[in-house]
Amino acid sequence: MKNIRSIITLGCLAAMAATSGAQGFRSGGGITDIMRAGPRLGPPAARPAPSAPSAAPVQRSAEFIVALVNSEPITNTEVVTRVERLLKENPDAQRVPRNELTRLVLERLVSERAQLQLAKEGGIKVDDVAIDQAEQTVARQNDISLAELRRRVAAEGIAQQDFRNDLRDQLLLTRLRDREVESKVKVSDVEADEYLRDQRNVSVKNAALENLNLAQILVAVPENATDAQIATAQQKAQGLAQRARAGEDFAKLVQDNSDSPDRANGGAIGMRSADRYPSLFVEATQSTPVNGIAGPVRSSAGFHVLKVVAKATVGSGDATVTQTQVRHILLLNDPKRTTAQAVAQLAEFKRRVQAGSADFAGLARDNSQDASAKAGGDLGWSRPGQFVPEFEEAMDRLAPGQISDPVVSRFGVHLIQVIGRREAKLSQGEQREAARAALREQRIEEALSTWMQEVRARAYVEFREPPQS
């Protein structure tokens, strides 16, 4: 099991990595690496709350202001907390001289504070329902209960309200960057086709361009496990790998033995680019053929036995993906209706459908505020990355026929039902859309970096005393 600092970083990375979407919610697609700011980072360090009792595991020096950003202070505690968190989370950071790391952390805090002020000025808000959902997502993606997540947060000396404030800030930054940067990045058909041609002409295969569909069996290892517990889990995983290699049905092995929430889909994670998988999985399966078994490999969650379901290269004629047929009911953000009221309404719709007193498609036609309403909410067959992360994360957890709980996204609140899944070859048009998404990601990174520099340059920043550990 991951410690809470890993949960904060990795859970939020998965839950809140932002791509922009058009109306409706479809998405458009060294030390520098350690400190790179952007929507894929975990939440900022908790802001100090002097009135709350301190349970911090490290000794902190006296409080004082180290910088002002448009008259808003950044304190020494904030910088020290962020440095300590970074050192614990990222081994690469330990190779950086402490004074240089502190300087970079302070600069990143300045940049984030300026962006948060811009979000406030722009009227961007995040309500408690969205924070509740983000908190639940962090817990779910780390295979622990919400109560256990909160216990670990407290054990790390982080007040619950500070943790929720961190999530709020991360969501604010995501929505601001979506509005100011990502929604403005466009890729034409000509550019997408050129990108496809370039990939087809690459003589040396780049693993990052490969699409993978992996299935896994997870044998979980408890946090603070004893050597005996670790050995037992490893032995179980090795036995399952041997049985899979001997020809036993992998999906059945998953169903009977896996501790991962994706067991409802036979352990299949879904076709996606290699850079959207943990590097541990990519390295373990790099030389494994389709239908081959790799592992077990060890992660902080436990031991993973991996099956390669499919491989394809972006731009190749044999590219296949896991497609999902999905429909939804969307209630848009509305000043006359709170998010909580929209959640309650959609929860009632779910209850009625499950009770057999209402039809999902009929409710969508009558109530959904999306262009898909006239089709009963049907969005057709989608490929990975086609929807914004909030929607897609919920969709991927559903087996065919299942209905989600209400899902809060940047567009409103959704009720989602998966109709079916299939493995399908990409048409030329779908390959173009996949190429468009890949090229757009590259441009977003560049545009985001430029925009953040511009926001930082416009802010009035006054540095006071240097931070002290």
Image (cartoon, grey):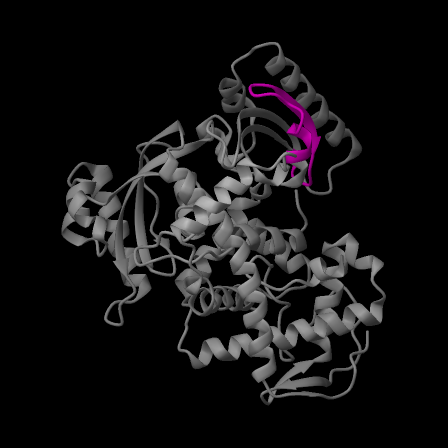
Dividing the image into 4 quarters, which one contains the N terminus?
top right
| Image coordinates for residue 462, horizontal then vertical, percent | 68, 89
Does 357 sit left or right of 22 as displayed?
Answer: left
Vertical comparison of 1 with 440: above or below: above
Q: Quadrant of residue 294?
A: top right
Does 168 sit left or right of 417 as displayed?
Answer: right
Q: Residue at x 73, y 85 (%)?
A: 64
Instruction: Please say whether residue 434 is one of the residues in the magenta stretch.
Output: no
Q: Quadrant of residue 445?
A: bottom right
Dividing the image into 4 quarters, which one contains the C terminus?
bottom right
Q: Residue at x 38, y 34 (%)?
A: 323
| Image coordinates for residue 20, horizontal then vertical, percent | 42, 58
Vertical comparison of 306 with 195: above or below: above
Which one is nearer the viewer's eye here, 109 or 130? 109
Q: Which residues are magenta?
A: 282-302
Q: Is residue 383 visible?
A: no
Q: Quadrant of residue 199?
A: top right
Q: Residue at x 49, y 21 (%)?
A: 251
| Image coordinates for residue 159, horizontal then vertical, percent | 61, 66
Vertical comparison of 227 with 97: above or below: above
Q: Is residue 90 visible?
A: yes
Which one is nearer the viewer's eye here, 157 or 383? 383
Instruction: Please say whether residue 291 is one of the residues in the magenta stretch.
Output: yes
Does 44 sit left or right of 22 as displayed?
Answer: right
Q: Residue at the top extreme? A: 246
